Image (cartoon, helix red, strand yellow):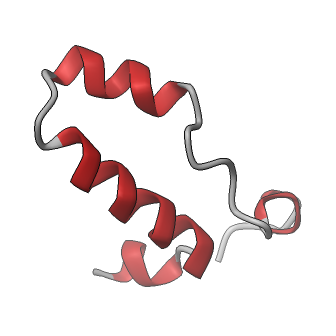
Amino acid sequence: MAEILANSRGTNRIVKRLLVERSDRPRAEALAHERGLPHGLPDDLAERMGSPPR
């Protein structure tokens, strides 16, 4: 639970959309779809990646 709460709102939004979309795809196809970044990246990615881990 703590790992989910540590994610940004943007990350959680993207993950939820990917989970819904993968429900009707085989695993390999779902992973390929995810790697294509269909929903982009979270707005705060650069900021969070430059910060030390909590």
Q: Is residue 8 above or below residue 32?
A: below
Q: Is residue 50 above or below residue 51?
A: above
Q: Is residue 17 above or below residue 7?
A: above
Please state which of residues 36 and 53 is positioned toward the viewer in this rendering. Answer: 36
Residue 46: name its quadrant.
bottom right
* Residue drawn 69% across the image and 52% down it: 41
Please state which of residues 23 and 3 is positioned toward the viewer in this rendering. Answer: 23
* Residue 26 at x, y percent in the picture: 13, 21
* Residue 5 at x, y percent in the picture: 43, 84
Q: Left or right: 53 with respect to 52?
A: left
Q: Left or right: 10 with respect to 35?
A: right
* Residue 31 at x, y percent in the picture: 34, 25
How many badges with numbers are in the image? 0
* Residue drawn 39% across the image and 75% down it: 4
Q: Is residue 34 above or below residue 7?
A: above
* Residue drawn 64% across the image and 77% down it: 54
Q: Quadrant of the N terminus?
A: bottom left
* Residue drawn 40% across the image and 18% down it: 32
